[in-house]
Image (tube, grey):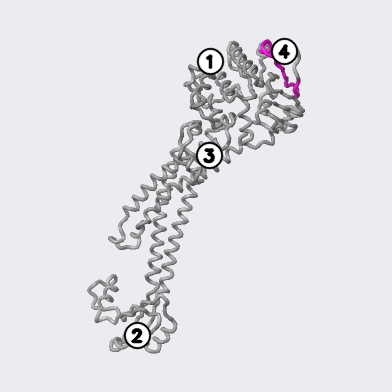
Amino acid sequence: MLAQMRDILRGDAPSDRVVPPAGFTAQLTLFASGAMAFLAVFALALSLAAGRIADRWSEELARSATLRISAPAEQMALQTDAALRILRQTPGVAEARALTREEKAALLAPWFGSDLPIDTLPIPQLIEVIETADGYDARGLRLRLGAEVPGAVLDDHGRWRRPLVEAAESLRRLGLVSILLIAGAMAAMITLAASAALAANAQVIEVLRLVGARDSFIASAFIRRFTLRALLGATVGTVLGVAGVALLPDASEAGGFLTGLGFRGAGWLWPLVIPPMAAGVALLATGYAARRMLRGLT
Amino acid sequence: MIDLDNISYSYGGGELFSDVSVRLTAGSFHFLTGPSGSGKTTFLKLCYGALLPTAGRLRVFDMDVPALDRDGVALMRRRVGVVHQDCRFLDHIPVADNVALPLMVSGMNLSQEQSNLAELLTWVGLSDRAGALPPELSGGERQRAALARAVVMSPDLILADEPTGNVDWDMSQRLLRLLVELNRMGKTVLIATHDLQLIRAAKAQVQARVLRISNRRLQLAGADL
């Protein structure tokens, strides 16, 4: 297929000349490939962003846990010290640190505002636990905490981390499936356009067969046209799509979940794959349409 | 050159002709005649592989035509020049390119063939019409352009289907002279026509055999022609 693509780009004057100038199928192919490439850019951006989110959540949450201590005010400091001592003695725990008053206030601020009188409320003490690469024995730790710090509950984040990562992974897969569907829809549209062009040029094909043209010569004339049109349309669509992605709000400014949709670093190079892929799809689709049509002629 | 052995051809439930046997040797000149609808065009189509016989053995250039694949048929057609009554041109390219079409599809270098092409267009009297588009040509010019296209590859066999059907007597004589000239150059010529005057005029210039399709059979026509 690469050799065929090279021949197409190099051009073949005789086979180009024998097919009449393009009709509506040229515009259809240009538009379809442009629109599909535009959509493919967004599907690609979604897929890459979802992948990044999945990786980040996986990494950030995998090695951390939270210990929550709910105890009467007079016992809080005692139980916190006991829990910290146990954690520091536990193999697999790299670091254990009680959240400060300001950190707790910051956690509650999105719901209750920054002026919450946190000292007057019975808020549990939170301890951030960071694991080593080997991890700790969560069951054993829970048993020990249960015996020595009755108000402690260990949350290793697994309960809510797993569905989040799975959701992000699903989103990434959805993006990839969308790209495949887009390629399939583009192939179908180009096959239809090529079939229409071949049918409109049935007399030309008949004359070419009459004077000794091989099927490969006839097919190449159509394949070259449709491949170049798809390449052009997809290039325009990709440029517009990339511009659209670039204009999306930056994650750092808005800080929301959806604003992270876009390309990062070398990810900006991925859309460059779309135009050649569109040309490849057009090449295969037109070749299929041409072979199917030519088989029916003598 | 062309060897038909007990050939039959049927379509739509009916038999157009049956048990046709004939051999056209290299360098011969044949006319194929018969009433309208007798199968003259079908016979020619069998000779260049556009149709396949329903029974019998068909060999062209010692090749079993029904056994050829699509590329094989295409290669065989490069050795056959066909002139249709309706000429069949590509209307969007000039006459010179239409004449050069067999060279183009064969992958030959057109720039090296320019002098031959110019010579050929002069031979058929179309040198001043080389840049015209086919719809701009008269009936006679179209027939001569079709003849030029048929011989541009210097084929061994020339098949012409009513080549003088749409032209006046002077032009038909001119076309006939070109075909006779080709035959003298060693080409095998088979012309399907119902124009008996043309056949008589040809027989005065060249030793031609006349085949007649009648009642689904191919016969050698009598001396009355």
Q: Give me the disc on residue B134.
A: none
Of the numbered discs 4 and 1, the one sitting upstream in the chain is 1
Range of magenta residues: B202-219
Structural distance between the alpha carbons of marks 2 and 1: 109 Å
Residue at x-position 46% and y-position 47%: A278
Q: According to the image, label 4 marks what residue? A: B225
The reply to whether residue A287 is visible in this rendering is: yes
Q: Is residue B11 visible?
A: no
Specify few, some or many for label 1: CA neighbours under 10 Å numbering under 14, 14-19, or 20 or more: some
Please report contact status of discs 4 and 1: CB closer than 8 Å, yes or no.
Answer: no
Residues marked 4 and 1, same chain: yes
User: Label 4, label 3: how many angstroms apart (C-alpha)?
Assistant: 50 Å
Residue B193 appears at what percent x and percent y? 66, 18
The nearer-to-camera label among 2 and 1 is: 1
Q: Amino acid at mark 3?
A: Ser
Q: Quadrant of the C terminus of chain A?
A: top right
State whether residue B172 is above or below residue A207.
above
The label number, if any, that marks residue A83 in the structure image: 2
Counting from the top left corner in percent of width and height, residue A168 is at: 42, 64
Amino acid marked by disc 1: Gly
For disc 3, the chain is A
Q: In the structure shown, which secondary structural element does the residue marked by tag 2 occupy? A: helix
Instruction: Estimate the x, y position of residue B1 in percent, counting from the top left.
Output: 70, 26
Give the quadrant of residue A78.
Answer: bottom left
Pick whichever, A107 or B149, lies toward us: B149
Q: Looking at the rendered structure, which numbered label has been put on residue A195?
A: 3
Look at the picture and state if A277 lies above or below B137: below
CA separation, marks 3 and 1? 39 Å
Q: Callout 4: few (<14), some (14-19), or many (20+) C-alpha neighbours within 10 Å?
A: few
